[in-house]
Image (cartoon, rainbow, N blue to C red):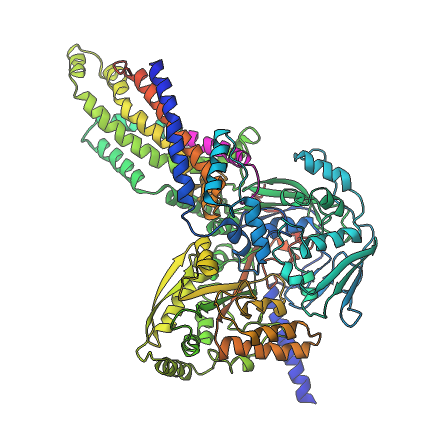
Amino acid sequence: MYEYIVKRILLVFPTLLGAAILVFFLLRLIPGDVCELRMAGEGAFVDEEALDACRANLGIDQSIFIQFVDFMWGLIRFDFGLSMWSGQPIVYEIGLRFELSLQVAIMATLFSIIISIPLGTISAVKADTWIDYVVRTFSIAGIAIPSFWLGILIILFLLIFTQSWFGVAWMPPIQYVPIWVDPWYNMSMLIWPALATGYRYSAVATRMTRSALLEVLREDYVRTARAKGLLEKVIINRHALKNAMLPVVTVIGIEFAFLMGGLVVTEQVFNLNGLGKLFVEAVTNNDYSLTQALVMVVVTIFVFTNLVVDILYAWLDPRIRYN
Amino acid sequence: MRKHVSILALALGTAGALAFCLTGAAADAAPKRGGILKYIIPSNPPSADGHRETTFGTIHPFAQFYSTLIRVNPDNPSSPTDFKCDLCVGEVPKPTNGGKKYTFKIKKGVKWHKLSDSIKTSPEHKAMTKLVGGKELTAHDIAASFSKIVNPPKGVGSPRKAFFLMVEKIYAPDNNTVVFDLKYPSGAFIPALSMPYNFIYSKKVLDKNIHFYEKNVLGSGPFQFVEWQLGSHIKATRNANYYYKGKPYLDGTSAVFAKKYSINLQALRGGRAYIQFRGFPPKMRDDLKKALGKKLTVQEGDWNCVLNVTPNNKVKPFDDVRVRRALSLAIDRWGGSNYLSKIAIVKTAGGIVYPSHPLAANKAELQKLAGWWPDLKKSRAEAKRLLKEAGYPNGFSFTFHNRAVDQPYKIVGTWLIDQWRQIGLKVKQRVQPTSQFYATLRRKKDFDVSMSFNCQSVVNPLLDVSMYQSASVAGNNYAAYEDPKLDAMFQKMNRSGDPAEQRRIMRQYEKRAIDEMAYQFPTMWWYRIVLHRTEVKGWKTSPSHYLNLDLSNIWLEEPLLSAK
């Protein structure tokens, strides 16, 4: 097992290297540069010397080979450099947003687990009854409705509801405050995006729980447990559900990693200053250095989440051994 | 005589009504002290350095921290010609030495901000504040700031350097006098000097680190720095030592960066912000007015931005003046003004100069230009005749290059395609995100006809029209033509100190650029619609979203319920 974990950790490096090479060259295929965008993007007259000075300061006037060597050298030293847009250290830029994204991801994951496992279990146990149909409809709706659209509906609902009931329209805060500074304010801002993304997330996990549990419930050992006269509750909770959790854990892991950098539109809808919004801004600003760093962060999160999921497999199913 | 008096009364009445509409508010009551102005900025500033940036994303959060030498009159910001002293004493000085010397006397007792010890900021920020905080701002600071803008050292970007080509020398003979010697008299100098980007920085700080102001704030304006969290918000507190006694009225400000316009709108509706200074599309105005009713104030007016049609003069058939003129003649600007203004942030059908400026063409003058004729049928018939003469009796197909931004680019672009369809042209639209759009326009130049735009801060027509000069002279001429006649007219106009002569040359310049040669031509001028909660008082709209943003005039009638 330990050998397997070490091997998996070692495999992380070529994966990161491949991602680094890809993102570096793909970004440079996009026409335009950050200086042109920053200085001429609003239609004002711009002195060409200022544009040249900007390009020279950022090093984007150098050959692509030199830029690549610089990037790789920084990567080896875990030095992402400065954002081309703001001039701030990238570690600082990402650090500022990481906390918010992590909190939303954790809240959405908790919401999803709380909803999906009981609903998926009920749906499987009561398969093809009206309860199953209700749960399936609920989960299919969750998959079909994009999180950002649900987010827009939530905001509009809050505005209209509070206006008509209290006479004053209320919307969630749009400026982040950490949970330890003001828990109530923090939750009143983040609960809504967590609900919007958690609903879709829970829908996927509910479907997965249902189908995995249905499969397990048809296994011989479950039939044997029933024949022995075990309580249905014990069969489901102790014997079936744990074994059915393998694909569910995979889904939850992948979704969690996705939430860390993939809430691109939802973060914009709620004006969350998270990694997803930063990603969009980095790409639209042609901020190569920041985009590269963000891609590397997200790839790392995915790689390590997958590693954690694999380790959880072994814990959930002792038959699994990695040799 | 009586007739003249009546006309005068009518004119004054109309002007008064217009002024009322533009400012959107009756005279405010006496200003109240206190409150935090929460506002929203649909941008994320690249840096805090006004000298280096060109975006409103830097002006909206940071202008409140800085003084300027002169500025657009904050009590009359809609006027394109009314400039007032900020740091200088009295009125904006008249030039001497045949229009080539401007001497400004500087206010005494203006102090650099001191930062509170509780503020979390960088060691460098604290050290620089210790160096100059609480000390007097002098003419040397002003001279150093403008020297950085006009003659930046190597490696320091100054995008508006070209606005100061007339400046020969800047110096401070003593602590309270700053002098600008010009190479030639220029009507463009005072407007250029009043640009909102010309923040006054400390000479001592610049001498130590000329890049300090990119990441740090240290000014002498109405508000002092409290906190700037990248991508999230910026906070400021009242400068109790501000040199305009009694101002600012607010205790502080708190601005949130939010690019999405839906968030901007909902923040106003949901009480998370009092105001957004850039502007909204008409549909959003109508929706918010419906939701908030009397709780919303609308201030509207012409915007110093214009959308231009830019044919690539090096690509066939747009190298033929008849084809370019046909493109302009096909456009129904007067009609379009009525219906486009209901759905897009455009309204006025003007020429190359900001519509209400004295140098702008009046309606009668405009209607003599091809493309602005009052008779649309005649105009389109002429367009068809020109196409036929150029060898395209059945029209032709081309691609219209546009920016992938709805307001107003794609809306006006779609409308243009329909205008051109009516003279037999088949046009496809190719839209690109801003970065790629600029790469095509500025460097790749692989387009037939493109949308371009000219958006400036202070209305300064003598320089704002520089884009119509030859491409080798004007970096923002994307139409790729060379015309020494236009270049000569531009130079002559800019070196004239006589407004009447400037106006006369401007008409010739305009006629040649957009009518006779139709190298590139305006469609419509933008229209700025600023929405704010009625609690906000004392602020007046201006022709540009870069102006009147030091926030010192603003006061709040009552706090918003949910404004934390």
Q: Is A11 placed above or below A272 here?
A: above
Q: Position of residue B450 (x, y in %)?
A: 43, 65
Q: Which residues are magenta?
A: A85-108
Outermost residue on the right side: it is B174
The x, y position of residue B261, in whole percent, is: 48, 52
Depth check: B21 or A245 in front? A245
What secondary structure prevails in the magenta region? helix
For the C terminus of chain A, the quadrant is: top left
Residue A200: in magenta span = no
Residue placed furthest toward the bottom: B1
Can residue A140 be seen from the camera position used here? Answer: yes
The answer to if A94 sits in the magenta stretch is yes
Residue that appears at 40% across and 37% down? A21
Direction from residue A289 to residue B173 in the image, left or right: right
For this rendering, which residue is in front, B279 or B113?
Answer: B113
Q: Quadrant of the N terminus of chain A?
A: top left
